[in-house]
Image: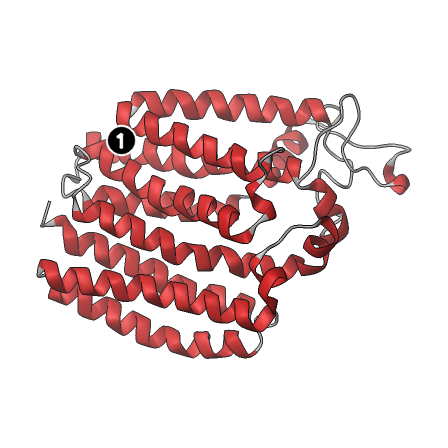
Amino acid sequence: MQNMHNGSPVGQPASSQAAPTTLSSAGGWLRLRRAITLMKPITWFAPAWALLCGAIASGALAWSLPALWLLLLGILMAGPVLCGLSQVINDFCDSEVDAINEPDRLIPSGQISMQDIQLIVLALLLLGSLLALALGRTVALLVGVGLLFAILYSMKPIRAKRNGWFGNTLVAFSYEGLAWLAGHAIFAPLAWTSPSVALAVLYSFGAHGIMTVNDFKSIAGDQQMGIRSIPVMYGKQRAAWMVVFTMAAAQLGVIALLVWWGSLIAAALIGVLLLIQLIPFVRFVRDPEHNAVFFNATAIMLYVWGMLVAAIGVAGLA
């Protein structure tokens, strides 16, 4: 990730300098479309799903219109607004690496200016803050921590992304743990001894491995920019083993706790989901680069469904 430069598009290649098309000069629909593209809708699912799981795990989510309205506001806050904000910040700070790995992205290709990015960030920051305050003090505090994590991850001088252990930990706990806890806090007081908190921590730990999957596609650029991702530090094979280990260890921990708490059906279901994941685990370890898409569609999706099962399993314990 890199610094932005005032007054001109960031990372604009020479071929596009003659007539850049920024959001400021684009039509209304094109401007909106590019803003949404920069916010990466595909990434909104993870924190939105974690917030839903946290709400269910609270045991206080009533299927009434007021409760569903609060849930909808929480999902809007965690997914499109705050996750979208973190993606804009990340892309802004990461355009030098993207210029090597993915030069056609909006920022390195010069399609978005500094002013455009500032407007998007300010709008999302204001909306996210208002939603957090409306959902309660605890949610606002968690959102504040999440925003701090986003800044530490992306921006200099800290730029935690430069180290796969620190950077992926911040993202994993933001997308899974903080979102899960926020979902719980919307509907019930958040006691730190709650089973919901333990699940949030374990699934965040497993998500660290999931974050590493995304690093396999950018090894060349990361090496050039001095970013010590897990695959760069340990090589593709060892990094792949670390991915499957962290995901499996987290789920085994969840199963153990569910058995301890007496939620045997939920524990058994997650055990079955974990056994099915062994197939994509093996394929991924053999060839992580070429099996990343398959891994996302199978192992990670099964991991995500296990989160919902665990949340339902502890809902009656609250």
In the image, taking residue 170 as reference, residue 61 lies left or right, namely: left
In the image, taking residue 146 as reference, residue 121 lies left or right, namely: right
Rendered residue at 22%/57% (across/down): 310
From the viewer's side, name the closer residue of 250 and 158: 158
Rendered residue at 17%/40% (across/down): 63
> Mark 1 is on which residue type?
Leu
Rendered residue at 61%/47% (across/down): 162
Answer above or below: position of 306 versus 240: above
From the viewer's side, name the closer residue of 105 and 150: 150
From the viewer's side, name the closer residue of 267 and 239: 239
Mark 1 is surrounded, within 10 Å at the Cα level, by few (under 14), some (14 to 19) or many (20 or more) other residues, namely some
Location of residue 215 (image quadrant) = bottom right
The image position of residue 126, as x and y in percent, is: 47, 20
The image position of residue 53, as x and y in percent, is: 27, 48
Rendered residue at 61%/38% (across/down): 38
What element does badge 1 sit on? helix
From the viewer's side, name the closer residue of 29 and 210: 210
Location of residue 65 (image quadrant) = top left
The image position of residue 151, as x and y in percent, is: 53, 32
Answer above or below: position of 257 versus 77: below
**Residue labelled with disc 1:** 70
